[in-house]
Image (cartoon, grey):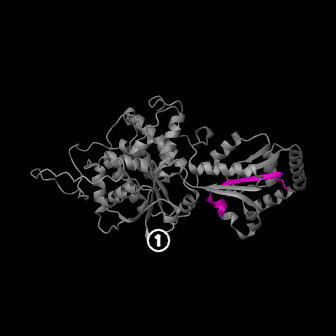
Amino acid sequence: MYKSFYNLSEKPFTLLPDPGFLYMSDKHRMAFSMLEYGLLNNAGFTVISGDIGAGKTTLIRHLLDNMDREHTVGLISNTHRSFGELLQWILLAFNLDHANMNKVEMYQRFVDFIIDEYAQNRSTVLIVDEAQNMEAETLEELRMLSNVNADKDQALQVILVGQNELRDTLRQPELVQFAQRISVDYHLQPLSAEETANYIRHRISIAGGNPDIFSALACEAVHRYSNGVPRLINLLCDTALVYGYAEQQQQISARLIVQVAREKQAGGIFPTYSPATEDDFPEEEPATVEAIAVAPADIEEATDTTADENETMPAEPASASKTPDPDAEPATPATPVTPLIPGLSSQPENVKRSEGDLYWEQQNERSGKKKVRIGLCAPQEGLRQYLSRLLESYGFDVICALPLDAEHLEKITPAELDILLIDRPDTGTPQPQAVAEQLANWNGPVLYNDSTATEISLKKGNPDFGMVLARRINSLADANMPTSRVVNH
């Protein structure tokens, strides 16, 4: 329906697992690396878990497409509570005859098969998808089958893939021996806000379309209502493209995503993670796709710029309910400040007001709302100062502003903060190991910000940078999800 309108060669957001559309986020790349590590190092049991729709099956399909001939693979993908005889399913997965065999005969048939493959320098790999449906007794039987392994090599390797319930089952006391044999395990988390935007653009690009069909704020809205779950992202985006086609919109806006989410929530079936309201996102200026094609680092500048060019922002946020006095004297421009970053000849003196600024002024004036406590870490002192002043102007309480290194991170107490803001130079560059480990184990919400966008805002005076950043901070604080990872690109 909408493919020709958006110049797409195929539908980019299908609900079926398609490895051709696989977006390798940091989390999916790590999960796939763990799968490969398990295979290469002869791990007896590998466990990959994750929420419903997190992309586990797509990863397995991608793994199967990249398997070498040294592995003979059997896949069980239709487990259920009335699973029945495990050995029958295993023999069926490897296309082995099991007609009219009793349990002992089936066991011997499988063992002979494994030994024969091992004699030909091939490892037998059994992959069980949707393994959360297997009872503890069935898992224990699977462990007993692994006793065929001898000496230093694993003739049989088992990969279990399932939802969160799989981890709960494996923690049961009767499966202690099974758990001790798990060499590799990884839990696949939902996508961050930045990863959600990149995921959307990636799939549209694979389908031959312009990656900027969805605006930056539309991508943010998709993340809010899907919580970064790929299957829900696909459902929202596919429906949004249908709506966009019906309304002949060349670009999908945040308002359209809100409309889609609200109507799906009204049906009472769609499991969104946040109620959709008309005030969630400010109106965006209608734009063609070509007009907003910008580099990722400049994405903050692609949002609403409809405010009056001559209107200035006061030093402190003003109430949105006050009506400007037409007889008042023009506002005096703010006094320029000393550049914070070496090499900059000047700082932006005044920035334009936008509907987003007024929206957040209203949010910050809500009665009874406590200030969100922010801990800020950034490599450059100038950016730390700029972000501190910017966040304080939006009503946040900046508790500390420190360099981004392991030594300073150790000095921060998570209980004293509501959110830890990390401003890093390049979101695609890995963090030092010590810093990455501290952030991975941080006991509280962490929000990552690309310092390239921060510097662009500092140099050019982009008001929407602060608005988008403030929106994400407030959204994360209101959600009160201690394990959240939200990225502002």
Query: Is residue 9 found left or right of 180 in the rendered image?
Result: left
Membership of 347 in magenta stretch = no
Membership of 161 in magenta stretch = yes
Determine whether 407 is above or below 251 in the image: below
* Disc 1: CA contacts within 10 A as few (<14), some (14-19) or many (>=20): few
Q: Pinpoint residue 54: horizontal percent, then vertical percent.
A: 58, 51
Q: Pinpoint residue 74: horizontal percent, then vertical percent.
A: 77, 46
Name the residue at the left extreme. 327
Residue 300 is drawn in which quadrant? top left
Name the residue at the front extreme. 343
**Residue carrying label 1:** 415
Determine whether 333 is above or below 439 in the image: above
Residue at figure coordinates x 44%, y 71% from the top left: 416
Q: Nearer the viewer, residue 98 or 334?
A: 334
Q: Nearer the viewer, residue 478 or 194?
A: 194
Residue 376 is drawn in which quadrant? bottom left
Q: Pinpoint residue 241: horizontal percent, then vertical percent.
A: 45, 38
Residue at figure coordinates x 56%, y 63% from the top left: 441
**Res 55 visible:** no
Tag count in the figure?
A: 1
Q: Pinpoint residue 165: horizontal percent, then vertical percent.
A: 64, 61
Query: Is residue 350 found left or right of 287 in the rendered image?
Result: left
**Res 6 visible:** yes
Residue 49 is drawn in which quadrant? bottom right
Amino acid at pointer 1: Ala
Residue at figure coordinates x 70%, y 68% from the top left: 172
Q: Nearer the viewer, residue 454 or 299?
A: 454
As helix, strand or loop, the secondary structure at mark 1 comes to helix
Which segment did they paint magenta? 152-167
